[in-house]
Amino acid sequence: MRIALLVAVSALVAGCSGGTDGSADGPGSTSATSTSSSPRQPTPTLTPPTKPSPAPTAVPRQGAAIGDVIGWIEAGTPADVAGYHSMTRGADTTDLGAGVAFTTAGGVTNCVTNRYRDGALACLVKLTDPPPRPAGVESAWKNNWVDFTGTTVDVGSPHGDPGPFGDGTGAELPPGQTLAFGGYRCRADPAGVFCVDYGHRTAVALSARGVEPFGCLKKTTPPAGIGLRFSC
């Protein structure tokens, strides 16, 4: 009997200690494995896509930034330059090859890439207030002749012959359309024709009211024989 009693007591003690030892497999386990959690990951910051700037809709005014002028010109509808490689005088048509010529509504502006000046843009503009003939100019004076080279704009100069305008005029560039050629792009508008020289980031507006420069072009003292000059 004493041996059986001792066996029973030993079994009872062993059972009690097994339920309270805090081991990982026990029903009362409080190990770090069962209570720990993974570190929280930071929430990614979402950057909204950048919306493109709307194209300028207002005609550039005096003092407008060159970027705004270029944006407004480029917002026009591109015209096919293939239709502007010739000039017409009466019944005669002259092929300009890679050269370009165009006019604006009402013939206010007549422009051509001047083959005598490395393709620089030359225009005849019906100015209501052209510059006066400079003193000392005895030859034929063209007060409405405009040369735009990119770094300079000359208004009014002496010419004994019509130069590139001897071939007549180019096709009309309708208002709202643009024409790209060489390093230039021009846009026709009822307010005038606006042309940019991309290589120098300069531009000019030509209309009956006058000549308006943009970019680094500023009014300077003209050389002999020139009525008005803007230069960088």
Image (cartoon, helix red, strand yellow):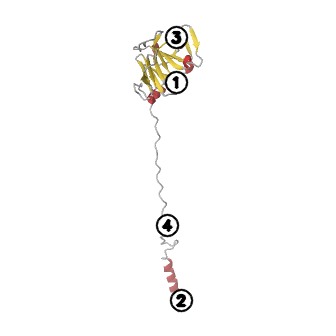
Tell me the residue that label 2 is attached to: 4
In the image, what residue type sits under mark 2?
A: Ala
In the image, what residue type sits under mark 1?
A: Tyr
C-alpha distance separating marks 3 and 1: 23 Å
Q: Nearer the viewer, mark 4 or mark 2?
A: 4
Labels 3 and 4: the sequence-earlier one = 4
Tell me the residue that label 1 is attached to: 184
Labels 4 and 1: the sequence-earlier one = 4
Q: Nearer the viewer, mark 4 or mark 1?
A: 1
Q: Residue furthest bottom?
A: 2
Q: Where is residue 232 shown, x and y percent of the image?
A: 46, 26
Other-residue count near label 2 (Cα within 10 Å), few / some / many at <14 / 14–19 / ≥20? few
The mark found on residue 149 in the picture is none
C-alpha distance separating marks 4 and 2: 41 Å
The reply to whether residue 92 is in sight is yes
- Describe the element under mark 3 as helix, strand or loop: loop
Other-residue count near label 1 (Cα within 10 Å), few / some / many at <14 / 14–19 / ≥20? some
- Describe the element under mark 2 as helix, strand or loop: helix
In the image, what residue type sits under mark 3?
A: Pro
Nearest the viewer among 135 and 231 is 135
